[in-house]
Structure formats: C-alpha cells, structure tokens
C-alpha cells in the first residue's frame, strides 16, 4: 500500500502536447505522454478525501496556467490514478474521444455569465426577470460554439441572480462577445450582466473513467 501511495498520480487535465515537446506545462507538475496527448499530473496519495479549499484553488491554478500555452480538457477535481500504467491504459482506451474533444475546444475559451435583477426595477411589460434573462441567454447563445446552463447556487436568491450560463467562445471573438453582452445590458435595463473569463472549458468536458 505504501508503494501505491508513492506512485499514484493526481490528474488535472489532458492537453494537446506531442511527445517530446514539453515535460511540464506548470511548475510542480509533469506530463505523461501518449501519442498526441499529455496528462497533466502530480504525485498523490491513492485515496479519495473530500477536496479542501486549498485543493480547489490549486486545481484551478494549474489548469489556468496550462491553458495559457495549450488546449486543455479539465479532469474532475480530485481525480487520482493508482499508477502511471493505469493512467496510460486510460489514455489509450479513450484516445480518440479525447483527441476529438480537444479539437472541439481548441481555440475557444469559456465565458461564464450571470444575470441579476437590478434593485428597484420591474420586468419589461410585466414579464418576469427569468423570462427576460432566458431571452438574453438565447441571443448570446448565437454568439458561442456551445452553451451550458449553470445551476443556481445557495446565495443566488439573496443576491438577485436569476440565471447563469457558460458559453464556449472563439478566443479571437472574445472581445466581440463581451461587446454583445454590454449591448444586451443596454437593451435589458432591468437586468445586470456579469462576465468572467476567459476560462478553460470546465463546463464543457465530462470525462469517463469506467471500463
């Protein structure tokens, strides 16, 4: 068991990096190469404790640093492989699915948009804030390669947040997307729009670990 703990690897994500191009994308991590893929990893104990706030911050830091120099598919937080051989088998098994997913997100960044009801405002012509927000999200969807509706969090009702979504935006059109959001905010004075990013495609990747 002690040996397994030493050689276990925490997987942060999979990047499009040809073998021999790099040994690391982020200080403190290394790359496990398989053909045109590279898994971003670091040594870890082979266990599944609940991620701490520090773990989450490191997870985001590593992916965002790697994202500055490569196309990246984020792994679920806390993903640990028992050994490098196990990880290599997984990369081999899912190679074509992973390469296809990387091709889809290449050249794109995620923009997270939250829409809030402005205090003291009424919905336009009696329509609810949720209906107005849904209309805006439909319009913004036309500016993105893909869209994911995000679940509301506990604080949203208190903060007046009526909708959240993530948009996969062509990186060369990032400024255009932001300008479109600003115009939509002007068109919908009852709503406030907040955009964060560019992010790695956290919301657009669902890795499989079965089989």
Image (cartoon, rainbow, N blue to C red):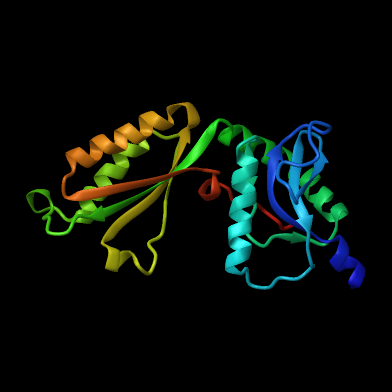
Q: Is residue 102 left or right of residue 87?
A: left
Q: Nearer the viewer, residue 77 or 120?
A: 120
Q: Nearer the viewer, residue 108 or 88?
A: 108
User: Residue at left 39%, top 49%?
Assistant: 165
User: Residue at left 78%, top 32%?
Assistant: 18
Residue 141 placement (x, y as % from top left): 36, 38
Q: How many marks?
A: 0
Which residue sits furthest front?
27
User: Residue at left 77%, top 46%?
Assistant: 91
Q: Is residue 108 left or right of residue 132?
A: right
- The answer to whether any part of residue 76 appears in the image is no
Is residue 82 shown above or below 22?
below
Can you tell which quarter of the image residue 44 is in? bottom right
User: Residue at left 59%, top 45%?
Assistant: 64
- The answer to whether any part of residue 72 appears in the image is yes
Q: Locate the N terminus by quadrant.
A: bottom right
Residue 162 placement (x, y as % from top left): 28, 57
Which residue sits furthest left?
125
Is residue 145 shown above or below 166?
above
Residue 123 placement (x, y as % from top left): 13, 53
Can you tell which quarter of the image residue 31 is in? top right
Q: Locate the C terminus by quadrant.
A: bottom right
Q: Nearer the viewer, residue 149 or 46?
A: 46
Is residue 47 shown above or below 80?
below
Q: Is residue 155 left or right of residue 203?
A: left
Q: Nearer the viewer, residue 208 or 35?
A: 35
Which residue sits furthest right?
3
Residue 172 placement (x, y as % from top left): 47, 26
């Amino acid at each position: 068991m002690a040996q397994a703990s030493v050689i276990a690897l925490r997987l942060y994500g999979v990047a499009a990096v040809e073998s021999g191009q790099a040994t690391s994308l982020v200080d403190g991590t290394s790359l496990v190469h398989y053909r045109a893929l590279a898994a971003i990893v670091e040594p870890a104990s082979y266990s599944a404790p609940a991620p701490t706030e520090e773990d989450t911050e490191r997870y985001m830091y590593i992916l965002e640093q790697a994202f500055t120099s490569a196309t990246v598919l984020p792994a679920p937080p806390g993903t640990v492989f028992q050994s490098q051989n196990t990880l290599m088998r997984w990369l081999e098994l899912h190679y074509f699915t992973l390469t296809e997913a990387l091709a889809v997100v290449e050249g794109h960044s995620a923009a997270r948009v939250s829409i809030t009801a402005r205090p003291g405002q009424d919905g336009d012509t009696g329509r609810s804030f949720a209906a107005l927000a849904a209309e805006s999200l439909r319009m913004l969807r036309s500016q993105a390669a893909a869209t994911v509706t995000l679940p509301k969090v506990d604080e949203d009702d208190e903060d007046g947040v009526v909708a959240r979504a993530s948009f996969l935006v062509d990186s060369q059109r990032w400024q255009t997307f932001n300008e479109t959001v600003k115009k939509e905010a002007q068109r919908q004075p009852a709503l406030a729009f907040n955009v964060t990013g560019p992010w790695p495609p956290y919301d657009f990747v669902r890795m499989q670990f079965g089989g």
